[in-house]
Every structure is written in C-alpha cells, then in structure tokens.
Amino acid sequence: MVPLTSYVTIGIFFLFSRIGDSNLSEITPRIINGTFACPGQFPFMVSIQHKKSHKCCGTIIKTKWILTAAHCIICPSIASCPINLSEIRVVYGSVQLYEEGMGENLFVEVDQLIPHEDFEKPDGSLSEHDIGLIKVICDQNDL
C-alpha cells in the first residue's frame, strides 16, 4: 500500500508542473481552503527554470537527482531546440514562483536532462510515460 503522503506529494507536484507555462493572471485556484507555504516547509520541492523563469516543479529524490515530468525537460516545452543546459537551473527553498529575484542564492546548474525513453508528446496533449530526471551539478547540501 502506498502511503497517503506519496499521493499528496505527487498531486502537488503535477498541479504545479501543469501551471508552470501559464501566465499568473490565467491561473485559477484549484485547491480549496488551501494555505500559503512557509519558507522551508517543503524542502524537497524545487523550481525548474529556463532563463530565470519558472517552467515546472520537481521533487528532490536523491542527492543530485530531481524527479519531474518529461514534458518539463524536453524542447520546445522548456526551451528552444537544442536545449542549452547553461540556461536551465534548479532553484531550492523558495515559495515565491513569480517574484522578482526569486531564489537568486539557492540555485544549481543542470548536468543532464533525462526524459523517459518512451515519452512522446503529441502536440498539446498528455502522453504516457510523462516522467523524467534532472541531474544537477552539485547537491543542495553544498549550497
């Protein structure tokens, strides 16, 4: 049996990964009676950014490894093709996705983007195997 906390984490992860490409003004509340997160409350969550702009969320699963959706790490979803890894970063510890200067001191560069080998995203639709990994250059303990 899978613990309830796993379902909650996965639900939060996919909710925020789906709104990553939306304009803030277009986002409609999907959580009823929710509360704002406090800094440090969810230390396992990260922001995946392209040119300092939030694109998707991810979850720290091991030192140097981030779990995310495959559609978040393929081009043209996150960046133009081919993806320039120096333009992608992972931000730790922030709860403000759309605030100027968010996470300036808590980011790491990306070493590898690894979408599931069977993921194929048809234009504008969801696909099976929408899961991927990001390997970062240094781990969050080095920050």
Image (spheres, rainbow, N blue to C red):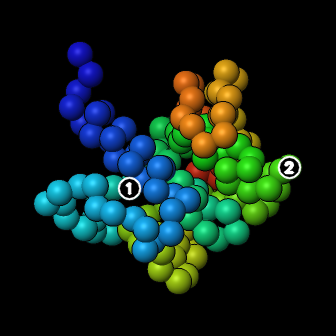
The alpha-carbon separation of the residues under discs 2 and 1 comes to: 31 Å
Query: Could you tell me residue 12's position as x and y percent?
Result: 34, 47
- Where 32 sits versus 119, above or below? below
- Say which element carries label 1: loop
Query: Could you tell me residue 18's position as x and y percent?
Result: 47, 50
Q: Is residue 137 left or right of residue 42?
A: right
Mark 2 residue crowding within 10 angstroms, few (<14) / some (14–19) / many (20+): few
**Residue 85, quarter of the rendered image:** bottom right
**Foreground mark, 2 or 1?**
2
Query: Could you tell me residue 116's position as x and y percent?
Result: 64, 27
Q: Which residue is mark 2?
A: 82
Give 80 or 46, whichever is nearer the viewer: 80
Looking at the image, tell me whether mark 2 or mark 1 is earlier in sequence order: 1
Give 105 or 4, whichever is nearer the viewer: 4
Q: Which residue is mark 1?
A: 43
Residue drawn at point x = 64 percent, y = 71 percent: 52
Residue drawn at point x = 53 percent, y = 54 percent: 56
Say which amino acid is labelled 1. Pro
